[in-house]
Image (cartoon, helix red, strand yellow):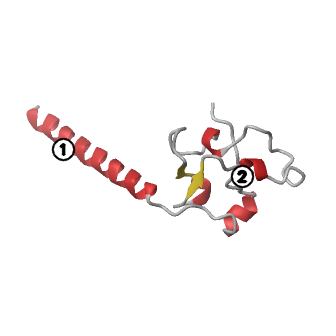
């Protein structure tokens, strides 16, 4: 029984360490540029107030990456990873056409 507990603890510590390291690596990830091909395809703007409302009629005032379900940071983070832009960070004040309001 003690062996199972010890194995569980060692595995848990390893998993938590790996998660912390991967989160730290994501924090150093480059920021998405509006000129990035994926950003252009999704209409990404680092400042949501500059979205072309004629081109993206779906956009509504108040929508921003920081309150999108895909945003992988805390609401207070200025930048955080987004799965739409693999390995890159988006601005919390940004917006793209993949926006999905956080529940």
Separation of marks 1 and 2 at Cα, in angstroms: 41 Å
Residue indicated by mark 2: 96
The C terminus sits in image quarter: top right
Examine the rendered structure and indicate whether residue 18 appears above or below residue 5: below
| Spot occupied by residue 49 in the image (x, y as percentages of width and height) | 76, 47
**Nearest to the observer: residue 18 or residue 77:** 77
Q: In front: 84, or 52?
A: 52
- In this rendering, the answer to whether 102 lies above or below 93 is above
Residue drawn at x 79%, y 52% is: 51
Could you tell me residue 16's position as x and y percent? 30, 44
Q: Which mark is residue 10?
A: 1
Residue 65 horizontal/vertical position (percent): 64, 45
Q: Tell me the tag on residue 68.
A: none
Screen quadrant of the N terminus: top left
Mark 1, Cα crowd under 10 Å, few <14 / some 14-19 / many 20+, is: few
Dividing the picture into quarters, in which one does residue 31 lie? bottom right
Q: In this rendering, would 68 be left or right of 59?
A: left
Residue occupying the point 45% across, 56% down: 26
- Indicate the position of residue 76 as horizontal and vertical percent values: 52, 39
Q: Is residue 69 left or right of residue 28?
A: right
Q: Residue at x 10, y 38 (%)?
A: 3
Local secondary structure at mark 1: helix
Q: Are marks 1 and 2 in contact (CB under 8 Å)?
A: no
Q: Dot 2 surroundings within 10 Å: few (below 14), some, or many (20 or more)?
A: many
In front of the other: label 1 or label 2?
2
Q: Residue furthest right?
A: 54
Counting residues from the N terminus, which is met first, the one under dot 1 or under dot 2?
A: 1
User: Is 77 left, or right, of 53 in this rendering?
Assistant: left
Single out the residue that lies furthest toward the left: 2
Quadrant position of residue 6: top left
Secondary element under disc 2, as helix, strand or loop, is loop
């Amino acid at each position: 029984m003690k062996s199972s507990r010890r194995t569980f603890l060692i595995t848990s510590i390893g998993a938590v360490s790996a998660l912390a390291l991967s989160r730290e690596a994501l924090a150093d990830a480059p920021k998405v540029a509006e000129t990035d091909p994926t950003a252009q395809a999704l209409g990404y703007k680092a400042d949501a107030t500059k979205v072309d409302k004629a081109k993206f009629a779906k956009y509504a005032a108040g929508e921003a990456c920081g309150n999108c379900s895909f945003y992988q940071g805390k609401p207070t983070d200025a930048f955080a990873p987004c799965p739409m832009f693999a390995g890159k960070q988006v601005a919390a004040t940004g917006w793209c056409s993949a926006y999905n309001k956080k529940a």
